[in-house]
Image: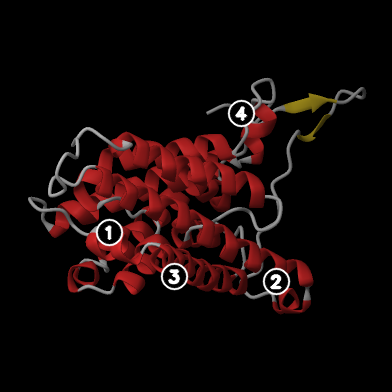
Amino acid sequence: MAKDVEVAEPAGTFSAKDYQDPPPAPLIDAEELIQWSFYRAVIAEFIATLLFLYITVLTVIGYKSQTDSDIPGVDPCNGVGILGIAWAFGGMIFILVYCTAGISGGHINPAVTFGLFLARKVSLVRALLYMVAQCLGAICGVGLVKAFQKAYYNKYGGGANELQDGFNKGTGLGAEIIGTFVLVYTVFSATDPKRSARDSHVPVLAPLPIGFAVFMVHLATIPITGTGINPARSFGAAVIYNKEKAWDDQWIFWVGPFIGAAIAAFYHQYILRAGAIKALGSFRSNA
């Protein structure tokens, strides 16, 4: 990992590193509760998650209806396929993170919020209200799909995440842990101020790698769990669909993403950014 870049002063001394890490967020910041910007961010998370679920669940149901072998004359090769579904999820994350990053940070996922909370990027109050807003947004987004296309929604599974036939719960849990690790690790890397300073000659639009991470994870895990990596997405679909199978496997789509997010936060903050070593006072980056 590259050393922190330091710039020589005219007097022969060295200035501080050429990037600034934001200060750690307080555990509980009561002042947030009286600021309009805080509630604006919560509303942004609600609307973004609503739009995310509306578009992606419609895509899933549309694909299933276009390839339904029970309908005479339907070509099983019709529809967008798994590749198209993965693009829908990744593309919507790219769009929505781009739109909301300057307002709420563009989390749109309780696992992302949890990882950023563990890294002291957001306060406990903000993290909890974001998660509530995300889950409510997901429920409303899927509810709109059902309201507009109830017959198709009920017939084709409501876009609910379920462990697919042939895979055990351990495999499903592992897929959710690793998939969420990839996503949250990408979030940390794409928004790292040190990376931005070190690689300023290679401009990177942060929502782009985040959207691609979601796309790639969906390609790998749709055949296993339908791809959760977002507890709000799985919860919202389960609430509206409300069938036994969706609830039987629901714990996988909470435990897996939260474990994956925690591992990603630890890896980035304490291994790549050497937080544990610096905390012990045994290491300093030298010029």
Q: Which residue is mark 4?
A: 3
Badge 3 vs badge 4, beta-carbon distance below 8 Å:
no
Q: CA distance from mark 1 to mark 4?
A: 43 Å
Which sits earlier in the primary sequence, circle 2 or circle 3? 2
Badge 1 vs badge 4, beta-carbon distance below 8 Å:
no
Q: Residues within 10 Å of mark 3 (few under 14, many from 20)?
A: many
Residue in view at x 23 percent, y 52 percent: 225
Which sits earlier in the primary sequence, circle 1 or circle 2? 2
User: Element at badge 3?
Assistant: helix
Q: Is residue 32 visible?
A: yes
Q: Residues within 10 Å of mark 2 (few under 14, many from 20)?
A: some
Image location of residue 108, percent across then percent down: 52, 57
Q: Quick check: 85 above or below 14?
A: below
Q: CA distance from mark 3 to mark 4?
A: 45 Å
Q: CA distance from mark 2 to mark 4?
A: 39 Å
Q: Which residue is mark 2?
A: 39
Q: Residue furthest right?
A: 11
Q: Which residue is mark 1?
A: 161
Q: CA distance from mark 1 to mark 3?
A: 14 Å
- In front of the other: label 2 or label 3? 3
Q: Is residue 16 left or right of residue 159?
A: right
Residue 39 vs residue 245, the one in the foreground? 245
Q: Amino acid at mark 2?
A: Tyr
Q: Residue furthest front?
A: 72
Q: Is residue 148 left or right of residue 20?
A: left
Q: Amino acid at mark 4?
A: Lys
Q: CA distance from mark 2 to mark 3?
A: 19 Å
Which sits earlier in the primary sequence, circle 3 or circle 4? 4
Q: Quick check: 31 above or below 266?
A: below
Residue in view at x 32 percent, y 34 percent: 83
Which sits earlier in the primary sequence, circle 2 or circle 4? 4
Image location of residue 268, percent across then percent down: 48, 44
